[in-house]
Image (cartoon, rainbow, N blue to C red):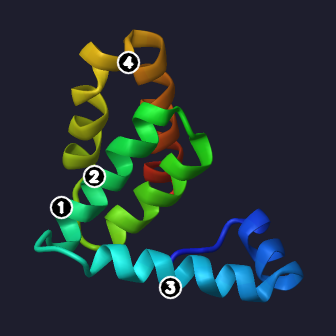
Amino acid sequence: MSQLPKRFEKLHRDYPEIAKAYEELGKAVHTSGPLDEKTRALIKLAISTGAGLEGAVHSHTRKAIEVGLTKEELRQVVLLALPTIGLPSTMAAMSWVDDILEKQ
């Protein structure tokens, strides 16, 4: 299992009922359709990239690695965002993916 971000651990400590409800929501949406685990991981990384969320890109990169996605697949997801979000945002997201890949 992925390492939980410190802020999420704090949410668990301070508001356990909200953290549990959030996790249950996540499980429900992940099992609500036909997409496989790898496809869902790529989509979550793409959403995080487009939203410019560094912590989420870190988290979803770790999760994507756990389900067997390669560094090439992860980097392509970020590159696919280039025409939509622009070069600076894409390069920032690529650096966030690389933050995690370099620790592997």
> Residue placed at 68% from the left, 80% from the top?
19
Compared to residue 91, the image places residue 74 above or below, namely below
Residue 78 falls in which quadrant of the image?
Answer: top left
Compared to residue 87, the image places residue 55 above or below, namely below
> Residue placed at 22% from the left, 73% from the top?
37
Badge 1 local density, few (<14 within 10 Å), some, or many (20+)?
some
Mark 4 and mark 3 lie on one chain; the one further toward the N terminus is: 3
Question: What is the distance, in whole Å, between disc 4 and disc 3 at their CAs?
Answer: 31 Å
The residue to which callout 1 is attached is 39
The residue to which callout 2 is attached is 43
The secondary element bearing badge 1 is classed as: helix
Amino acid type for the residue under numbered disc 1: Thr
- Of tags 3 and 1, the one toward the viewer is 3
Mark 4 and mark 1 lie on one chain; the one further toward the N terminus is: 1
The residue to which callout 3 is attached is 24
Could you say where residue 91 lies in the image, as x and y percent from the top left? 44, 21
Question: What is the distance, in whole Å, between disc 3 and disc 2 at their CAs?
Answer: 19 Å
Residue 38 falls in which quadrant of the image?
Answer: bottom left
Left or right placement of residue 17 versus residue 67 in this view: right
In the orientation shown, which residue stands out farthest toward the right?
14
The residue to which callout 4 is attached is 85
Question: What is the distance, in whole Å, between disc 2 and disc 1 at their CAs?
Answer: 6 Å
Amino acid type for the residue under numbered disc 4: Ile
Q: Nearer the viewer, residue 88 or 48?
A: 48
Compared to residue 73, the image places residue 41 above or below, namely below
In the orientation shown, which residue stands out farthest toward the left?
34
Mark 3 and mark 2 lie on one chain; the one further toward the N terminus is: 3
Question: What is the distance, in whole Å, between disc 3 and disc 1 at their CAs?
Answer: 20 Å
> Residue placed at 77% from the left, 87% from the top?
16
Amino acid type for the residue under numbered disc 2: Ile
The secondary element bearing badge 2 is classed as: helix
Question: What is the distance, in whole Å, between disc 4 and disc 2 at their CAs?
Answer: 16 Å
